[in-house]
Amino acid sequence: MSWTLLFTEQYEKRAGKFIKRHPELEKQYLKTLQLLEVNPYHPSLRLHPLSGRLAGLHTISINLSYRITLEFIISDQEIIPVNVGDHDAVY
């Protein structure tokens, strides 16, 4: 079962800025997205739902310091990345 990543224009701008600021993370970021598309439940992604003002979104980890927040639509097998950055930037 494969998932579809849907990238919005807003997310692509945010991701571009993130990679520009952190070029050393580009390979790890891309690997995270590939794994997300194949298996969003893989333990290394540490997928979990958010609460509070971000209720309805989920988050995954690129590494211990950087995250991607997601809209996770299970019924349609779609994942829409919302934001990428360190803990303070995405929460």
Image (cartoon, rainbow, N blue to C red):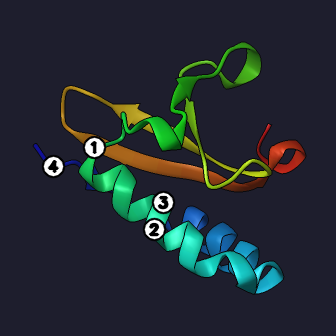
The residue under the point 68% across, 75% down is 25
Q: Amino acid at mark 3?
A: Thr
Q: CA distance from mark 2 to mark 1?
A: 18 Å
Q: Which residue is mark 3?
A: 32
Task: Give the Cα separation between the discs numbered 2 and 4.
Answer: 16 Å
Farthest residue to the left: give it. 1
Q: Splitting the image into 4 quarters, where does residue 22 fall? A: bottom right
**Residue ID for mark 1:** 78
Decide: is 60 above or below 31. above
Q: Position of residue 47 (x, y in %)?
A: 51, 32
Residue depicted at x 36% and y 40%: 40
User: Which residue is found at the position 74% from the left and 20% from the top?
Assistant: 53
Asked if the residue at tag 1 contacts the one at tag 2, i.e. Cβ–Cβ closer than 8 Å, the answer is: no
* Disc 2 and disc 4 in contact, CB within 8 angstroms: no
Question: Considering depth in this image, is 49 or 24 the residue closer to the camera?
Answer: 24
Q: Residue furthest right?
A: 88
Q: The disc labelled 1 sits on which kind of residue?
A: Glu
- Tag 3 and tag 2, C-beta contact below 8 Å: yes
Mark 1 residue element? strand
Q: Is residue 84 above or below residue 28?
A: above
| Percent of width and height locating residue 78 | 27, 43
**Please, is residue 7 above or below residue 86 in the view?**
below
Quadrant where the N terminus sits is top left
